[in-house]
């Protein structure tokens, strides 16, 4: 997707100098990344996530950051770091938004070791998104050294993004309200920044039927699996590709024995929405869903957990600025939309201009070939620094 904005920006940000600085700091950036990746941090392991948080906090403290740990019990602590001068008057901070939890269990490094080969950096959590965290800290360091960090910059690193941000969402939204813009450190979409994301929802449908002997008392049974098949057809038909609305049953099951009319069945449903207004509508459809066989009962739990990040004027303006700065670095930055969600969905829904995909370039997020392209590391770090400087 290309921006339709023709805005031309007159900027005094020294982009070529920032690029040279990013190249000089690349080895230190990679070392910080190595330490973060070596500290495996699956979302469901508080102590492991907290250990990774401690590494990031140490790096931020070394840069003069003002550190705040939002302590949690069941999840890893959320890390808030503030850099640059404290907020003055109406000048609002900028929020850099990321996370330190990953989808990878402890021990993954044995099968997916941190390594540099074939022009790439490999390892669990590199692309999603520990390199992005290291890029942010490096960009802040570069600007501080050049006396270009003239506005307060907040770096928020969440501990539960990969499992829906159940405890960090209110922290993210509270900080976003303070800020003029949000830069999300998730990986790029190919080579593009992300200006739109779909919202997400999850439902679980449980069906209670009536068990009976399949040979002796067939007519006395009410098959939960048969009812499930009807339900799957019904909810799947709610998909509307023109609206960007998809409903997908990803997991289903039920029954006990082949000679027993099944009394129980279930389905887990993934929903994606491109428009905010589709959230209440799809939630209402799930609420009124009924069984065709009145002998069966339905229990339905779930809802929309992330609103869509829609392509707003504020986001387009941020992208136009980024594209202008990228041109000074010698490359044509494009924009894209994606069906995946991030914590940027929350901030965008609040009306805060939000630009996403400002982290590393690579491929294989959540996959065994997760890696980043090293040749893109310095240019993307310089671009991030330029955006922070121009937001000052």
Image (cartoon, rainbow, N blue to C red):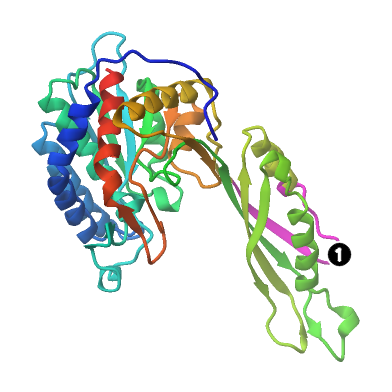
The magenta segment: 286-303
From the top left corner, tell me how far across and down residue 163 is, in percent. Answer: 44, 53
Question: What is the residue that sits farthest to the front in this orientation?
Answer: 330
Asked whether residue 198 is in view, the answer is yes
Q: On the image, which quarter does residue 299 sit in? A: bottom right
Q: In which quadrant is the C terminus drawn?
A: top left
From the top left corner, tell me how far across and down residue 270 is, in percent. Answer: 61, 54
Say which of 326 and 160 sits in front.
Answer: 326
Give yes or no for residue 281 being in the magenta stretch.
no
From the top left corner, tell me how far across and down residue 255 is, in percent. Answer: 70, 79
Q: Residue under circle 1? A: 293
Seen at 56% across and 31% down, the residue is 310
Q: In which quadrant is the N terminus drawn?
A: top right
Query: Callout 1: helix, strand or loop?
Result: loop
Q: Label 1: how many residues lie within 10 Å, few (<14), some (14-19) or many (20+)?
A: some
Seen at 24% across and 57% down, the residue is 37
Going by the image, does 195 lie left or right of 328?
A: right
């Amino acid at each position: 997707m290309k921006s339709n904005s023709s805005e031309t920006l007159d900027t005094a940000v020294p982009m070529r100098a920032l690029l040279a600085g990013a190249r000089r700091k690349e080895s230190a950036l990679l070392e910080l990344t190595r330490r973060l990746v070596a500290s495996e941090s699956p979302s469901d392991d508080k102590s492991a996530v907290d250990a990774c948080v401690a590494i990031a906090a140490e790096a931020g403290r070394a840069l003069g950051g003002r550190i705040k740990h939002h302590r949690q019990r069941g999840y890893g602590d959320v890390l808030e770091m503030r850099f640059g001068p404290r907020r003055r008057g109406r000048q609002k901070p900028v929020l850099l938004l990321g996370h330190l939890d990953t989808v990878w269990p402890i021990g993954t490094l044995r099968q997916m070791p941190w390594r540099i080969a074939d022009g790439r950096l490999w390892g669990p959590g590199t692309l999603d998104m520990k390199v992005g965290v290291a890029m942010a800290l490096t960009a802040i360091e570069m600007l501080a050294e050049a006396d270009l960090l003239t506005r307060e910059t907040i770096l928020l690193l969440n501990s539960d993004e990969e499992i829906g941000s159940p405890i960090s969402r209110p922290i993210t939204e509270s900080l976003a309200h303070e800020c003029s813009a949000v830069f999300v450190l998730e990986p790029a979409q190919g080579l593009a920044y992300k200006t739109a994301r779909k919202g997400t929802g999850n439902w679980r449908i449980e069906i209670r039927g009536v068990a009976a002997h399949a040979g002796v008392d067939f007519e006395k049974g009410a098959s939960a699996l048969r009812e499930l098949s009807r339900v799957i057809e019904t909810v799947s038909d709610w998909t509307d590709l023109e609206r960007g609305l998809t409903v997908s049953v990803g997991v289903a099951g039920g029954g006990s024995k082949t000679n027993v009319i099944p009394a129980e069945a279930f389905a887990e449903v993934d929903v994606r929405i491109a428009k905010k207004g589709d959230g209440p509508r799809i939630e209402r459809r799930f609420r009124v869903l009924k069984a065709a066989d009145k002998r069966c009962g339905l229990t339905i739990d779930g809802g929309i957990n992330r609103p869509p990040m829609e392509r707003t004027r504020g986001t387009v303006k941020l992208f136009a600025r980024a594209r202008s700065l990228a041109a000074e670095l010698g490359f044509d930055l494009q924009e894209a939309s994606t069906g995946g969600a991030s914590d940027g969905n929350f901030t965008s829904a609040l009306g805060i201009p939000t630009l996403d995909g400002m982290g590393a370039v690579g491929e294989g997020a959540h996959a065994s070939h997760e890696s980043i392209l090293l040749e893109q590391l310095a240019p993307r770090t310089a671009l991030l620094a330029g955006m922070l400087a121009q937001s000052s």
